[in-house]
Image (cartoon, grey):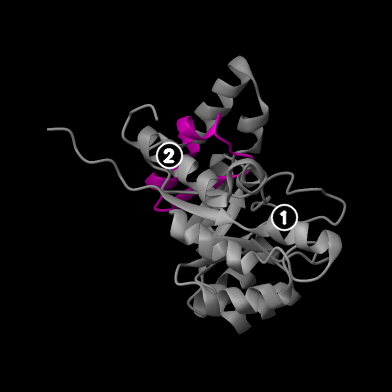
Amino acid sequence: MKSAARPLRLGVNIDHVATIRNARGGRHPDPVRAARLAVAAGADGITAHLREDRRHISDGDIERLVRAIDRPLNLEMAATAEMLAIALRHKPHAACLVPEKRSEVTTEGGLDVVAGRDQLAPVVRRLGDAGIRVSLFVDPEAAQLDMARALGAPVVELHTGAYCEAEGAGRERELARLAAAAAHAEKIGLECHAGHGLGYDTVAPVAAIATIVELNIGHFLVGEAIFVGLAGAIERMRALMDAARRGERA
C-alpha cells in the first residue's frame, strides 16, 4: 500500500501588501487584514520581512501581527543587533535570517553561512535560547547546509530564485540541485523549507520534493490577487501544491 505523502505547509508572505500601502501612505491596504484572509484561504503561517529601511513591513505591523493571527509568524530579518532586539521583544514563532542590502529590489541570493559563521552564531544562539525557531535562507549547497547544522539552526530555507528564473535544461538542473540539497538537509537533521519567486508555473516540481516541508510564497500571490483576489490566488496555489505532493496534476 502506498504511504501517505508528507504534509506540505504554505507560508504566505504579506510584505507587498505593505508595499502598496506605503506607496501612498495611510492604512490601506492593511497587511494584517491580508494575513487573516490568507489564513482563511489555507495558509499555514504568515511571513513578514522587517527590513532595515522599512520599505514595506513596519515595526507596528509586526506588533499587530503577533497579536492578531492564530498561525505561526515567521519574521524574516537580517542578522543585525537591531533586528535581533526586535525579534527578542516580539517573540515570533520563527525567525528566518536572510541577507539584506539596501540597494537590492528583493533578496538576491542565500546567506553565505560559511563565510558569515562568526556573525551568525551569536544571533542563532540568542534566538534559539528565546524559544524562537531559527531558519537560515541559503542557496542549495551542501556546504551551506552543513554549516547551518553546525551553528545549531534547526531549519534551512532553500533559495528557489535560480530555479524560477532558469528555462529548459537549466531549470531542470536547478531543480535537481534543490532536490539534492533537500535530501542532504534531511540526512543531517535539518527541516527543509523553500521559497523565492515561486508561481503557478514553477511550484509543482518543488512541492513534489518530499523532503521539503514548507514553501514560502508572497510576491506572486499579492500580484495575482489583483486579478482573482487574495483568497482565490492562495486557494489555487494551495491546490497546485497539494496535488503535486500527491503525485497528481491540479
Q: Are there few (<14), some (14-19), or many (20+) residues within 10 Å of tag 1?
A: some
Residue beneath the point at 81% across and 63% down: 22
Q: Is residue 197 above or below residue 177?
A: below
Circles 1 and 2: CB atoms closer than 8 Å: no
Q: Position of residue 102 (x, y in %)?
A: 85, 57
Q: Amino acid at mark 1?
A: Pro
Q: Position of residue 120 (x, y in %)?
A: 65, 64
Q: Is residue 129 above or below residue 30?
A: below
What residue is pinned by disc 2? Answer: 241
Q: Position of residue 190 (x, y in %)?
A: 43, 53
Residue beneath the point at 31% across and 34% down: 246
Q: Nearer the viewer, residue 174 or 244?
A: 244
Q: Would residue 188 be counted in the magenta stretch?
A: yes
**Element carrying mark 2:** helix
Please give the label number shown on residue 99.
1
Q: Nearer the viewer, residue 32 or 247?
A: 32
Q: Which residues are magenta?
A: 179-206
Estimate the spatial distance between the alpha carbons at disc 1 and disc 2, rounded to whole Å: 27 Å
Extreme residue in the left direction: 1
